[in-house]
Amino acid sequence: MKTYRRLIILSLVCMVISSCAIAQADAKEQVDIEMVNKIKAEAMDNSSAMDNLNYIADVYGPRVTGSPQYYEAAKWAKNRLQEWGLESKLDDYPTDLRGWHYESYSVQMTEPTFMTINALPYIWSNGTNGVIESEIVLVDPEDITALKKLKGKLKDKIIVSPNNESLDDISIKPFSEEQLLKASESNLANDPEGLDNSGIKPLADYLRAKKEQRTKVPNEADEVHQFLIDQGVAAVVVASNHGLGVVSANTLPYNAIGDIKPVPHFSIAKDQHKRILTLVEKGYLPKLKLHLNATFNTEKKYHVNILGEIRGVDPNLKDEVVMVGAHFDSKVGGTGAADNGAGSATIMEAVRILKAIGVKPRRTIRIALWDGEEEGLQGSLGYLKKYVGDIVEGTYEEEQSKISVYFNMDQNGHDLRGIFTQGNKKIRPIFDAYLKPFHEYGAATTTIQNACCTDHLGFDALEIPAFEWIYDPLYYFSHQLHVNTDTSDLVKETSMKRNAAIVAGFIYHAAMRNEMMPRK
């Protein structure tokens, strides 16, 4: 009898354990492996990712916000999304941004010998009104005290900065397994040793400070630039803060309608700038010849985001939205290929894949290509204020409750290695499940850490789950980020194919799951 009772108890225990195991299995995030395989096959066999990039960067780049090049690229992207079967439109947003573009520029040294100089104009610089040739004046163009000592002596002169600082070595390696493991084990969202500038402050604080700054009396930088204008300075030339032959793409802080138009500014190759300084040290007085044909515009039509949708089909979920976004504008350097043509091309490819394999999402999938990220996230913040909520005021529109998740891609054309969860602990096991089929691509890391300084921050500030990916850095910080060498030659097609498959997999599963993504 005791043996019989033991058998009954053992059987009941086994039934309980079995039931628990089934419950645990059911509780795990569901991943459709058959669909993932279809996504991978389409991504590898029929990719349009590099073709997208060739148009975005090589045909239309660079794409400075508010420029005709940006607007033409935006129209192309809208039409391509429509060709793939998405509903698509250009969508304006509230902004006081003006536009700027150049038709031509050049910088040369003509004395004591000739040298063609590798240069880039600063965005928001005024033009030169023709060719200028002048002896240089060596003075720090940011030091108002030093400049005032030369008052009355700077008219039609070209100022050359004396600063040419040595550079620290920049790593051009992929993330090591040790770095990725350390990130995955981190328990700090704002980790000082994070993979991507994790020490970020609340976006609302930044926006308030920025608003206050624009209403205050002019600061020292304003005084400097007005002084240069008043003194009739012909141009300002500074050394690039990158390595040999790599020229920094810089921006002046006057992007709004009604702002001053600063004198022409140029960044030139560090090694050529050093040669000019050496000539001065040896007693020579170099002469430079330059021009900049630049145009400002205030046409609102140039400031648009590009939106596209695959409509949801579930009667109960179709009004909820899974969003994927990337900024479409660029700096003036190169063609804006890695930053952020590759990101834009990749997410366009992700939605193309889903459309091509016949996905019928339960939720609506929305792609957004943002304007004005390089000028302070202007396009995405404008979209949010128009449709979702006011970050500074802390008020929400109805759409705030409808956006399940936002995935951002501000990438570099290298391998995607995982995802930052922005301190959202609840989402981590979900993303672990979504990444598992892509471990073969080297994408296996989820981290609690924050990613900084791009378009997901506005969504996160409005309490919407919003995320950025982990990418191998390689030569992004040395040869791609805001420099003249940011061209499509440095973007890897294999990486774009893999990255598009991963993004498509995440979008698909987020659109098909029973519940919205958990919020922080």
Image (cartoon, rainbow, N blue to C red):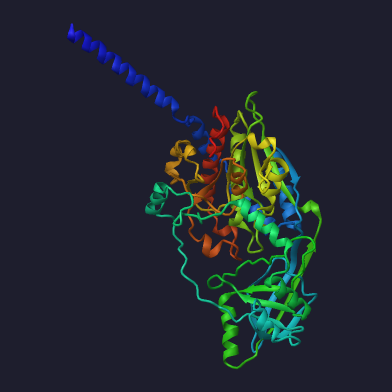
Percent coordinates x, y for residue 453 in the rendering: 58, 54
Residue 333 percent location from the top left of the image: 64, 64
Q: Does the image show residue 63?
A: no
Which residue sits furthest left?
2
Vertical comparison of 518 with 135: above or below: above
Question: In the figure, 60 relative to 232: above or below?
Answer: above
Q: Nearer the viewer, residue 236 or 498?
A: 236
Residue drawn at point x = 44 percent, y = 59 percent: 173
- Residue under the point 47% across and 70% down: 168
Q: Is residue 273 visible?
A: yes
Residue 62: which quarter of the image? Answer: bottom right
Image coords of residue 437 (percent x, y)? 45, 37
Q: Quadrant of the N terminus?
A: top left
- Above or below, 194 against 367 in this view is below
Q: How many marks?
A: 0
**Nearer the observer, 349 or 471:** 471
Q: Residue furthest bottom?
A: 283
Judge whether 272 appears above or below 374 on screen: below
Q: Nearer the viewer, residue 191 or 444?
A: 191
Q: Quadrant of residue 219?
A: bottom right
- Residue drawn at x 66%, y 55% is 208
In the picture, measured across the screen, residue 284 lies left or right of residue 38, that is right
